[in-house]
Amino acid sequence: MKTAGVVSMMPSIALSEEYYSPAYASSFPMSIMQGSKEASSGELQVIAGQIPPDLYGHVFVAEGIPLEENHLTPNGKGALTRVDFGSDQITFTRKMIETPSAIMQDHVDGWFDSFYLLGGTVYYSPNLGFMNYCNTAPNYMGDNRFALSYEGGIPFEFDATTLELVTPIGHINEWETSLPPIADFFTPDKWLFPQVRTTGHPFFDLEKGECFTINYGGNAGTTGTSSGFIRVIQWDLDGPLKAWNIKHRDGSNAFIVATSHSLGVTRNHILIFETAARVENTRVIGTHTVTPQEHKTAVWIIRKSDLVEGHDDVVADRIVLDFDTSDIMCNYDDHAGEVTLFGQYLGAMDKSEPQFNFEKLFFGGRVPEPLSGYPVAPVDVGGLVRARIQVTAEGAREIKDDFHVIRDESLMWDMNDPAYRGHFQFPESFDHIYWAAIGYRPEHLVRRVAKAYENYPNRLFTNDTLPQEAIPSALIHMDCRQMQVSDEYVFPEDCVMRTPQFMSRRESTDQDDGYIFAAVVRKIPSHADSNGKEYWIFDAKDLAKGPLCILSNPNLNFATTNHALWTPSIGPRPGYAYRSDVAQYFRDKMPSHSRDVKQILENHILPRFG
């Protein structure tokens, strides 16, 4: 997500009719802005429908909880929920994601030690460094090992049975700071939590027992790109990280201006995508200026055979695709050097832009404080895309004749999380992908974003023709072979649906043979026993039929969910598995810190990660 700046102060005025924006009269469920910060568990009750008899396994759901006004909700304080589907009951267990920096934030006090929200997206402490909530996506690594990833920090392994973090992936010193050199020069040596930028979706290859991810930074948007870098990282799940600096064929350094939410891995190649979430440098001085995302996706293509141990660099070919995206996947099969990609088409949608308290809305009124931090509405309808790349020994090119985009003006607003069989491990060839369209709320469209995207390419709606009524969330079934929407379900208007997840049927192999789990927040709960925080289960082959069952519990209180993961079984993490020795790192820095920080390290952090 975007690096941040100090949030400008809003004027202190009496509440007026203009302040009470249309959000208060809308069908939007404001409870999505609140999530419990206490651990909870219990049995999920069926409040509608019936549980399919062959539903089984475990679903993990990551979420973000905003802590104060303007805090971008997907990037909020992390929580992790596990839903267990048993033969006679369905239960949930929910805990906070307690990284070392999150633990420190919960306990620390003092002006220079405390963490402060910058630009609505990241917390920063002058004495300690940057927050890592590790709340983007749960991942399966094989052998009862699981990981949580985050674009703004080092990933961590967790124990699936306890939901407790066990170890960072890689020693802190194995990751390069992502700050520009001038900022890094002024960084105190005593910082415990450096800023590290990586992808939200590292790739764990279960057959080969290895992980690929990246580490990038050195520049701030388009400023200081001569110092920018991208490192591709290979890990055998046991030893130290191996890393290579990515270079163009002319020897110049590769860099990322925006973010890299997704990573593509095929049998022979690694694809690094520059995804749509631009860094505004002026946020550091407190402005809310919006720089539009570019209508393009840069891709660096690396041949796995070029990752030679002992070499510092690896050559990548860079091409630019003519659409912007965030979640993008690829067929694992890359026969004859042909790579097939599937992703969402974002269009005029700024996924990393929060609504700021009291700022002007496009259709009148202002953002109310309880809603501040929720992502802005899209300024145009999105879509789904397929693109193909030809990779040779000499270079790479897009196969433009095979490009295909699907757009639906009544359905595809705010295209978001994908779900598919083997989530976060790619199949040989994608046949079916399920997508969340979160929807459109005119009362969430802020004026500054509408103005910034006024002349964005390929818009189907102009600012003058944008809908002034809500378009609900939708669950979409994409037939990848036919490149068409084969099935869909449109939710009631008072619902926000996020985080769909595919769940296989027992003994099944087809990519559409199973169920779709979805996290739903309702303004009008589905039943008197529901608090509006619900899980809906669909037949993957018949979304239009509606939910087969709806699950809820009064103590289940999640906020904005991010990605999810389904696995057929879980067990305790093996005792012999990898652990990064970070205890000495913290101990070496302890003498430079206050008594308060030392006590928190000794009493709360080292006992867990020592």
Image: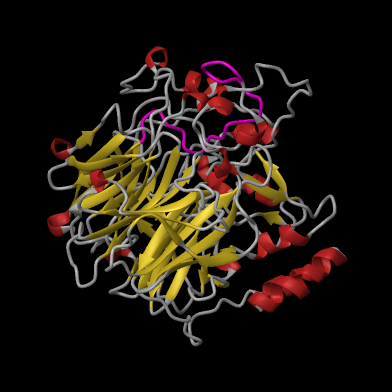
Q: Is residue 602 visible?
A: yes
Residue found at x 34% / y 23%: 457
Of all residues shown, which one is farthest toward the bottom? 576
Residue found at x 64% / y 54%: 131
Q: Is residue 107 above or below residue 160?
A: above
Left or right position of 172 against 523 = right
Closer to the camera in the image, 170 or 380:
380
Location of residue 590 (image quadrant): bottom right
Q: Position of residue 451 (x, y in %)?
A: 49, 18
Q: Position of residue 318 (x, y in %)?
A: 32, 45
Residue 364 lies in the magenta-colored region? yes
Residue found at x 20% / y 72%: 507
Residue found at x 24% / y 43%: 544
Of all residues shown, which one is farthest toward the top? 464
Left or right position of 67 against 197 = right
Q: Quadrant of the image for the C terminus? A: bottom right
Left or right position of 192 against 350 = right
Residue 34 lies in the magenta-colored region? no
Closer to the camera in the image, 551 or 431:
551
Q: Position of residue 113 (x, y in %)?
A: 80, 55
Prevailing secondary structure class for the magenta stretch in the rendered image: loop
Q: How is the image coloured?
A: secondary structure
Q: Which stretch did the figure color magenta?
A: 346-365
Left or right position of 499 against 280 = left
